[in-house]
Image (spheres, rainbow, N blue to C red):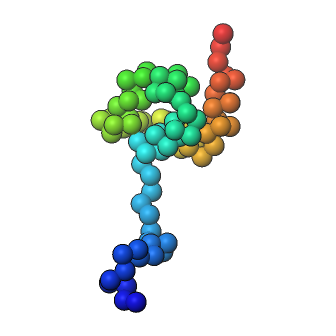
Amino acid sequence: MDDIDDDNPDWSDFPAAPLDHAAKLKATRARLAASQADFAALLQVPTATLRNWEQRRTKPDALGLAMIDLVYDDPEGMAERLRGKRVA
């Protein structure tokens, strides 16, 4: 069968674009089943800030981007660590 006529081509060798900060935040929040308010509290940022990041209205600073990468790479572990750092 000719690849041109293939309705279901093999895309496994096609390089995927890396996720940006907004996609990483949304994916991580979904994996943790967290609301925006809960996830913002975990990251210690205002909910409006998280919302703006997720909607690509604003971009996090370098520290924010590093935190997003850390939480994205290990959502459950980082959530546990961040919750343990809270001061009562």
Residue at 32% across, 84% down: 4
Residue 87 relative to residue 72: left or right: right
Choose between 3 and 65: the one closer to the eye.
Answer: 3
Residue at 42% across, 23% down: 47
Q: Quadrant of residue 71?
A: top right
Residue 49 relative to residue 64: left or right: left
With respect to residue 13, does 48 lie above or below?
above
Query: Does any portion of residue 88 appear in the rendered image?
Result: yes
Residue at 42% across, 29% down: 50
Of the 4 image quadrants, the one containing the N terminus is bottom left
Residue 44 image offset from top left, x and y in percent: 52, 23
Seen as rendered, the residue at the extreme left is 57
Residue 55 image offset from top left, x and y in percent: 33, 37
Q: Quadrant of residue 16?
A: bottom left
Seen as rendered, the residue at the extreme top is 88
With respect to residue 56, does 84 lie above or below?
above
Of the 4 image quadrants, the one containing the C terminus is top right
Q: Quadrant of residue 87?
A: top right
Residue 31 image offset from top left, x and y in percent: 56, 40
Seen as rendered, the residue at the extreme bottom is 1
Query: Does any portion of residue 21 appear in the rendered image?
Result: no
Residue at 55% across, 33% down: 33
With respect to residue 36, does 75 lie above or below?
below
With respect to residue 72, does 36 lie above or below?
above
Residue 38 image offset from top left, x and y in percent: 52, 23
Counting every numbered tag in the picture gives 0
